[in-house]
Every structure is written in structure tokens, then in C-alpha cells.
Image (cartoon, rainbow, N blue to C red):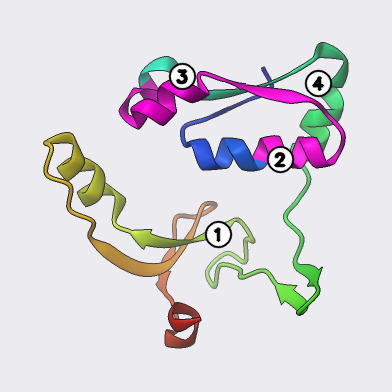
Amino acid sequence: MIRRFRDLPEALLAQGTLESAGIESFLADENIVRMDWFWSNLIGGVKLMVSPADASAAIAILSQPIPEKIETPEGEYEQPHCPQCGSLDVSFEELNKPIAYGSAYISLPLPVHNQGWKCHTCDHKWDAPADEIAG
């Protein structure tokens, strides 16, 4: 086991990254989390498994820094960064997770949305410009 993930999409992205590099891997406890994601913390999340011979290469691949720019067929994509600390480890948050998860726990799911960015380094949150939300 080289990594644990609470959420399945992150685990699938990491697995895809390794597969694109030619490293075989599998996800342990993936089906339990697929059936009921509330169990993820209880079982220790989804585990990314590789052969012992590939472990150091897989860890090195997954530990690479986030690139600032990516070339795409449509042109160059510039990774958003945190205006507070400059980190590239940011994500676009559409769902208000505390309200959505809490309401799902009591069997009354309320998909409350708040569109904006979140930095995973310093926890800074900022609003998304209108053109980013529409696009």
C-alpha cells in the first residue's frame, strides 16, 4: 500500500496516473466505498496497492509537484493558484460539504452549492469569477 484516499475519485486519478506510467496497481476497499462512502473513514479509506518492486517508482510519480502550465490541443492551460500563499494545490469547490454530508447522514440530502476555490495548503477560500463559473 503506497497511499490511502478518503474519496474514490482521488484514488482513481492516482491509479490512472500510475497506469499511464506503466505501473500496475489496484484499489483495495474500493467497492465498500462505492456502495456507501460513509464507511470510508471507518475502514481507512481506499488503498492504492502496487507490487513491492514498483513501490518506490510509484511513490516518486505521485509525489511530483503540480505543473504550473499544461499543453493541451486547445492551447496552454495555466493552473490556478492560491492568492494568499501561491500554492498550486487548489480545487474548485461546488458543494458545501459540511451541509451536504450532514444532511445526507440524517437521510435528508440537501445539495447546497457555494462556488469558489479552496487552497489545500493554507485552507484559504475565495470566490470564483463569473466567467469561470459559466465556462
| Foreground: disc 3 or disc 2 | 2
Residue 55's label in the rendered image is: 4
As measured in the structure, the alpha-carbon distance from the residue carrying label 3 to the one carrying label 2 is: 21 Å
First in residue order: circle 1 vs circle 3: 3
Q: Residue at x 88, y 15 (%)?
A: 53
Q: Which residues are magenta?
A: 14-41
The local secondary structure at tag 2 comes to: helix
- Magenta span: helix, strand or loop, mainly? helix
Q: Residue at x 80, y 74 (%)?
A: 73
Q: Tag 2: Cα neighbours inside 10 Å, few (<14), some, or many (≥20)?
A: some
Q: Assign the N terminus to one quadrant of the image.
A: top right
Q: Residues within 10 Å of mark 4 (few under 14, many from 20)?
A: some
Q: Give the camera-side residue of 37 and 99.
A: 37
Residue type pointed to by label 4:
Ala
Q: Are marks 1 and 3 in contact (CB under 8 Å)?
A: no
**In the image shown, does 72 or 93 lie closer to the viewer?**
72
Q: Which residue is mark 1?
A: 90
Please state which of the two labelled residues, at mark 2 or mark 1, is closer to the viewer. 2
Point out the tag, 4 or 3, that comes first from the N-terminus. 3
On the image, the x and y values in percent for residue 90 come to 55, 59
What type is the residue that disc 1 sits on?
Val
Query: Which of marks 1 and 2 precedes in the sequence?
Result: 2
Instruction: Read off the residue under disc 3.
Output: 44
Residue 29 sits inside the magenta stretch: yes
